Amino acid sequence: MVGVLIRMKLAVLRHSMTGQRAADMIGGGVLGLVLAGGTIWLALRDWPVDGLPLDLVGAAFAIWTIGWLFGPVLFGGGDETLRPEHLALLPIPPRRLTTGLLAVAFVGVAPAVSLVAFTALIVAALPVGGAAVAIAVPVVLLQLLFVVLASRFVTAALGTLMRTKIGAVLAAVISAGILALTHTGWVLKPTIEYALTAGFPDDLADWVRRLPSGWGIVAVEAAGRGDWLLAVAAPAGLAVLSAAALLGWSALLARRLRHRTASGRPARGRTAARKVRGGGVRAVAGRELRTASRDLMRFHYLVFSLVYALAFCLLPLLVDLPIFVPFIGVAFGIWAAAISANLYGEDGTVIWQTVLTPGAARKDVRGRQLAWLLLTTPVVLLGSVVPTLLSDQTWAWPWLAALVPALLGGGAGVIVLISVLRPVPMTDPHKRSGNLLENGTDFTQVLLMLVLVAATAAPAFLTVRYGPAWAGAVVGLATGVLLTWLLGDLAAKRLEATGPDLLATMRAATSRKNNLTGDVDWNQISASLGGVDLGERRLGIANASPARRAAVYVCFTICWIPLIAQGLVPAILKYTDPGRDSWFVARLVPETLHWPVVSLMVALGLGLIAAGFHQLRAARAESRHATVDRPAEVRPALPHPTGDAG
């Protein structure tokens, strides 16, 4: 069974390497390899303090483990290429199914990249001695086994918890806290600089080794000094934890197959029966407000925005920096808009009601804007006024008076416009499982929204920065009102013009997600999505094999790293700032090798570009042959309306 499941996953991956998914997989793999290379570099570099390489590798392993444990909360459910529900009707015991899915979990980009990163333990063990290297090799495999199993168990446990509002809050706190910590990492810069020059403090070094991610370091050090009892006990501990995670995952998997509930909570009869007074816009706003309180996904997003704003603005207080405290409300408003830009994608095919009702599109857009403002404005105002008063940061009042109305108005306009222009189809709310992790977040859309929402406040910001302070509030209020009206009007016109196409997109995507047999009309889906891809049709490679298209993407994606980042830029710095120390490869080798390494990197980048063009020509030829060789589609004759075939 294990071999069958592995072949199934490989087949799914092979046929899904198209469009945005291919770009995400390739980009994630390249980024992961860069981070893995950085982990190995920590073990290779000659640090000024003995034992520091092992400390750094242990800290890096802790970060990798945290990424495996809580990454699915940030990026949406982990690897669900093969869903257990698809195998629920087969006579397979849960333990055996868990074993098969465990083997499948090691097939993919993330496990391969993590294995490369964990080899840093072997590199760090080389100076310790041959015995340390001998114990490091199996520990690397155990480390990978542990993180994969622990990730599966934690993801399954959080998925069970997130069927309730308490679980949604917990997931929001975890994901927002991790993200805010990464964005405020500069707070720890003095501590990191001290650790890199004087070594880890004793308490920190002990904690690095007490965590399961550091037990490999404990085993290597114990083998180096001949303490074989501890050298064997540390890997044995990893094996025991892995077995416990496997048993826990198996139990949660069995529970998952038995219980499938819808997202959110059922509406109470009194609330559901109550009519919203006023028609049109107010009715839509009332519906959206009730949805925000009942739908776990939207509730999770709102809590995430609030927790991120609090963590991001309050963490700098650790280094006596209260400058961000007045902007808690502003940060909440920006993130609340960024994760609210998929309103129609989250609703799914229910948009048919709006499409088929004359004049409903404009009222629907305006109602969604009103509901978003009613939800976010009180929190933004409280998060701006109260922290400013408590922190006595009176200098921030002109900035808040300008930025708050601009961001609220701009956010209300941008969310509906992007929801119509760039919807990300999701499963219909009534068909979703209660597990929020199964509904991933489109981070491309989130990043786009962060930029657009911040840009809406640019006029108000520039007015306060370079003009009189009182004018900032006027400009902010004016731009907020103007953007709310204009962008909402554009969204309404777009929805009226392309409503049927938007509905077709939702229907095609949801049918693909709900189809358990794999019998999907990919041509229909591609047509309904309006050709949203990586430019494959314009390049003429739409019908080439996934492997050939992937080769084109890889070559043209990573060629710029050696050519520009590691080639031309170090060459320029060699002339302009020859004494500067940096992370460029050419600056990390002896000076006599600077120019040879720069030349090698430039040649590598040019070689990747040449290889990319070669693969592009081959893909175009393959696509042309596939188009010519494709058999003509035979369509059945439609019956005559009168029943006469003729």
Image (spheres, helix red, strand yellow):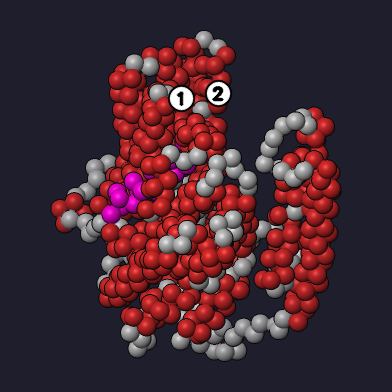
Outermost residue, front side: 226
Q: CA distance from mark 1 to mark 2?
A: 9 Å
Q: Position of residue 232 (x, y in %)?
A: 41, 67
Asked whether the residues under the numbered discs 1 and 2 touch, taking CB atoms below 8 Å apart as contact, a structural biologist would say no
Q: Amino acid at mark 2?
A: Pro
| Residue at x 68% of width, y 37% of height | 582
Neighbour tally class for label 1: few under 14, some 14-19, many 20 plus, Cα within 10 Å? many
Q: Position of residue 521 (x, y in %)?
A: 56, 75
Q: Position of residue 531 (x, y in %)?
A: 63, 61
Q: Amino acid at mark 1?
A: Leu
- Residue pointed to by mark 2: 459
Magenta residues, start to end: 167-184
Q: Is residue 207 above or below residue 212?
A: above
Q: Is residue 597 above or below residue 84?
A: above
**Mark with earlier residue (1, 2):** 1
Q: Quick one: SS at disc 2?
A: helix
Compare residues 295 and 104 and report the one nearer the observer.
104
Q: Please, what is the dominant secondary structure of the magenta stretch?
A: helix
Query: Per the image, is 394 magenta?
Result: no
Q: Could you tell me if residue 355 is visible in this image?
A: no
